[in-house]
Image (cartoon, helix red, strand yellow):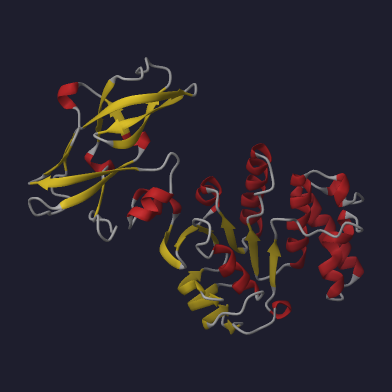
């Protein structure tokens, strides 16, 4: 395995600049997940690492080796695609062995590697089947097995679970996590699914407009977002945002009275954006309320419920205990939140004010 380093990677397609100077260092054996909205450059960056796209500027290192202009076959990188990319006329055994035979690997070694990989992925009983005779989840395991058998220095995953239903996504996601833990491979994984990103990543990389908006351990990025974009992108339901005005240590708006304390120093009358995650609010008494939610719709989901409505005139969602009495549409629901769970942003730049 080897570390993967990107320095100043820029890429323009036609009139559109897709990557705007990407700097990224993925350690040997680390699983990094690229996440971001459609069009942010995730897949283009992955294809650039694979050698399927050539950067206009920048350097790409695999270990100490500069592979910026190297063709894909010389990079020692394996890629697992969204579409599986299996050969329909070959059995599972021959699909897994295909890349090894291209490299003139000894047949005894091929058989040993195929058997080992099949056992580790739980597909040893499928070796004589053809792709058409298997489910989507089984095909994706075969695609992973083909990559693993090659023993490359870096694995690339391009939204490998997006074609699977919810139950299969969860199952194969666990298989990928187990695979990474067992072989300790360097992996770069692209997804639009936040659950995949949060649960798989050692390092979470949030892209926005062709730039790295923030990176770090998933829980650090989630709990301490550097920008309003990151705060709003991670989490489901997404973070609530309210426009407020500083009045000393208090932040005020219609149906909102929050004490920021000494976390930030704001001049009197300064505008600030207050961010609150739906699961951080707690129903309280009217006297202790920081927010007052005018309830419009309640979604009861068993152990939890979501109350949708407005605080002032701004849409707001609150997560509630589904096993307690729930508010009715039209009710005013007093809510509080701990000071530590408040996120404060500059409304002009979007940068966090409390780091």
Q: Is residue 191 above or below residue 250?
A: below
- Quadrant showing the C terminus: bottom left
Does residue 50 appear left or right of residue 20 in this picture? right
In this rendering, is residue 12 above or below 254? below
**Residue extending furthest toward the top:** 325
Name the quadrant containing residue 168. Answer: top right
Percent x, y of residue 93: 88, 57
Q: Quadrant of the N terminus?
A: bottom right
Residue 139 location (% of width, % of height): 78, 50
Res. 338 in view: yes
Left or right for 254, reference 107: left
Q: Position of residue 317 (x, y in %)?
A: 36, 33
Q: Is residue 138 above or below residue 204?
A: above
Query: How many numbered dots are placed on residues in this image?
Result: 0
Q: Residue at x 29, y 19 (%)?
A: 331
Q: Residue furthest front?
A: 15
Residue at 66% from the left image edge and 59% from the top image edge: 183
The foreground one among 111 and 305 is: 305
Q: Is residue 1 visible?
A: no
- In the rendered view, does 88 fall on the left or right side of 157? right
**Residue at 49% over, 57% down:** 36
Residue at the (70%, 60%) spot, across then down = 80
Q: Position of residue 123 (x, y in %)?
A: 81, 48
């Amino acid at each position: 395995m080897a570390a993967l380093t990107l320095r100043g990677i820029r890429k323009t397609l036609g009139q559109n600049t897709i990557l705007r100077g990407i700097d990224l260092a993925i350690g040997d054996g680390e699983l990094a997940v690229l996440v971001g909205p459609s069009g942010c450059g995730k897949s283009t960056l992955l294809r650039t690492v694979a050698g399927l796209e050539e950067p206009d500027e920048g350097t790409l290192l695999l270990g100490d080796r500069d592979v910026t202009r190297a063709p894909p076959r010389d990079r020692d990188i394996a890629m697992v695609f969204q579409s599986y990319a299996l050969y329909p006329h070959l059995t599972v055994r021959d699909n897994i062995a295909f890349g090894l035979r291209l490299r003139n690997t000894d047949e005894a070694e091929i058989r040993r590697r195929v058997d080992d990989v099949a056992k580790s992925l739980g597909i040893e009983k499928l070796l004589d089947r053809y792709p058409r005779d298997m489910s989507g989840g089984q095909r994706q395991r075969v695609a992973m097995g083909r990559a693993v058998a090659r023993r490359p220095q870096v694995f690339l995953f391009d939204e490998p679970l997006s074609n699977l239903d919810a139950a299969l996504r969860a199952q194969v996601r666990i298989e990928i996590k187990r695979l990474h833990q067992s072989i300790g491979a360097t992996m770069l994984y692209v997804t639009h699914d936040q659950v995949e990103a949060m649960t798989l990543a050692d390092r979470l990389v949030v892209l926005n407009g062709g730039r790295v908006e923030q990176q770090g351990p998933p829980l650090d990025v989630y709990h301490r977002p550097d920008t309003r974009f990151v705060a709003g992108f991670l989490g489901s339901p997404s973070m609530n945002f309210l426009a407020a005005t500083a009045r000393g240590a208090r932040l005020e708006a219609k149906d909102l009275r929050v004490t920021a304390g000494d976390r930030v120093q704001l001049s009197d009358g300064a505008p600030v954006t207050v961010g609150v995650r739906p699961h951080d609010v707690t129903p309280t008494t009217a006297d202790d309320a920081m927010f007052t939610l005018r309830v419009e719709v309640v979604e009861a989901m068993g152990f939890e419920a979501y109350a949708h409505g407005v605080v002032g005139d701004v849409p707001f969602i609150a997560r509630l205990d589904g096993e307690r009495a729930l508010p009715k549409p039209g009710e005013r629901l007093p809510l509080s939140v701990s000071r530590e769970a408040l996120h404060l942003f500059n409304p002009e730049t979007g940068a966090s004010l409390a780091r």
